[in-house]
Amino acid sequence: MSSKSITSPSFTFLLSRLTKLTSTYSGLDASLMLVQYSSPLVIAVLLALSRLIKRARLSGLAGYGQKGAAVASGWGLLQLAEGWGKMGVSVGDARVVFRAFGLLPILQYLLTLHPNPIASLKKFIFSIGQKGSLSSEKTLPTLQLLSLAAYYPLEHIAWLASKGILPISAQRTGKAALWSVRFWALYVLLDIYKSRQTYISLLKRTKQLKYQKPIIQKQEAEGFELPPSPSSPSTEKPTASLTTPTTSTTIKSEEDNVSTKAQLQNDWKVWKNQAMINSGYAPLTVHWSTPGGLWTNPLISGTFGCVAAVGRLTAEWRKGN
């Protein structure tokens, strides 16, 4: 590759965007998440290629000598697959370490929503179950924050115990891990409900924009006169022309209309992106929240994880637009 192509504006722009993406915690975590969950898929591809190469040798299509020995060993693909699996586990551990202080912003946001926690907690508890309780601006975010406030400590306890740092029995470690994911599943469920409410709102806004009256242009109203009104107290024929918006008002209205459409389109993109993330997280959290899990094939978990990771990366990438 020439030096000219390396320093092209498109490559520089891509490098700048990737640097910005991975310089934030959320962007870096989304990138590592894709690496972690794509590991089972990459390993499956490497193992399949290794089997094909070995089969080719057995069919007499491979060479002899050192080349034949290399083919017989699958060109080192088995070792590469094993190493890739270890890397996926290490990346997963790194993501847990990165979340070590994830509880701090949760507590900060809770205090922002409820400056007086004791009084707010009493009011919140008594409001649960009442009609329209979820329609409050603070109820849904509070429930999500409380679920994360329970998820983070349990996840860290389970991880530290699995590494032998905390002297906790395997049974209690398993319970801590199980309940941590259940609180995460609760967060995802609440987020799906929030997405449903957002979808209803977006549909309403879309219909309003679709059926709103078009703006009357000045040139369209020129030469048009109002007909005489029988109920008018004046006996003279009215000659007043239809009042038309000024050019500046018309331009402003057109700009507002374009801005509204652009904002609506952007909100639809955000909603679709969030729906993609939840479609990956929902089955994973249900799977991990069930003792024994719903499946044993790691490719299923890897596929759902990649869906959520791509959705998160897309959301982070759009932040740079």
Image: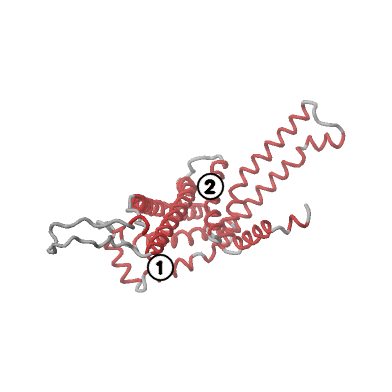
Q: Which residue is mark 2?
A: 307
| Foreground label between 2 and 1 | 2
Amino acid at the residue labelled 1:
Leu
The residue positioned farthest toward the right in the image shown: 65
The answer to which of 141 and 264 lies nearer the viewer is 264
Position in image of residue 204 (x %, y %) = 33, 52
* N-term mark: 2 or 1: 1
Task: Note whether residue 13 is visible.
Answer: yes
Taking depth in this image into account, of 114 and 314 the one nearest to the observer is 314
CB atoms of marks 2 and 1 within 8 Å: no
Where is 291 relative to 103, above or below? above
Q: Is residue 102 left or right of residue 147?
A: right
Q: Residue at x 76, y 42 (%)?
A: 76
- Residue where numbered disc 1 is placed: 110
Q: In the picture, residue 115 is in which quadrant?
A: bottom left
Q: Amino acid at mark 2?
A: Val
Name the image quarter holding the C terminus. bottom right
Q: Is residue 171 above or below residue 75?
A: below
In the picture as drawn, the residue positioned furthest to the top comes out as 59
